[in-house]
Image (cartoon, rainbow, N blue to C red):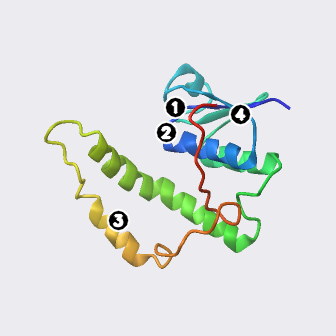
Amino acid sequence: MPVVELVGPAPSTYTRVARMVCEEKKIPYELKQSPPHSPDVDAIHPFGKVPVMRHGDFELCESKAISTYLDLSFPGPKLIPTEPRHAALTEQWVSLVNTKMDGTLVRSYLLNYIFPRAATANRIAPQSMPSCRRSRRKSRFSTAPLPKAGTSPAIALRLPTST
């Protein structure tokens, strides 16, 4: 069987998701570090986003699609539940993270805080924080503890520094 090739920068949140799936399921993979819009990425993703994946002659983009393919194609613990309600909750949280939480917490807050663009950069992104507080108040799930990896949609592990 051909080795899975993941293409994207190691620090990328979404490249890390695909790597976590490979690590959790013990899938051999190679990480080709390429930035967004590089020729390798543009050849697979119509918008030049990372990660992308090659597995033999099969190419795929978007971390959720890559994760689902890997989960269904390789042996090991199932990372996406098969029970309909648990599967739906998994999809709900993946969607929330991709559409709201990543943009608010990572892109607006964390990156501005860690890598300010100027000495006067807005380090706490106050425009995004009220929406975080509102979202937490509305969600009955936000304070629930996350289950262990392999028993639900939650995966918690440390990735090796090099692959």
Instruction: Inspect the image, locate mark 1, and give the three-letter code of the amino acid beneath it.
Output: Pro
**Residue that protrudes farthest toward the bottom in the picture:** 140
Residue picked out by circle 3: 132
Work out how far the residue at label 1 is from the one at label 3, CA to CA, in angstroms: 28 Å
Front disc: 3 or 2: 2
Instruction: Inspect the image, locate mark 2, and give the three-letter code of the amino acid beneath it.
Output: Ser
* Secondary structure at numbered mark 3: helix
Residue 3's place in the image compared with 149, above or below, is: above
Front disc: 3 or 4: 4
Work out how far the residue at label 2 is from the one at label 4, CA to CA, in angstroms: 17 Å
In contact (CB < 8 Å): disc 4 and disc 1: no
Instruction: Inspect the image, locate mark 4, and give the three-letter code of the amino acid beneath it.
Output: Tyr
Q: For the N terminus, which image quadrant? A: top right
Figure disc tally = 4
In contact (CB < 8 Å): disc 3 and disc 2: no
In contact (CB < 8 Å): disc 3 and disc 4: no
Q: Residue at x 32, y 65 (%)?
A: 131
Work out how far the residue at label 2 is from the one at label 1, CA to CA, in angstroms: 6 Å
Residue picked out by circle 1: 9
Q: Residues within 10 Å of mark 2 (few under 14, many from 20)?
A: few
Residue picked out by circle 4: 29
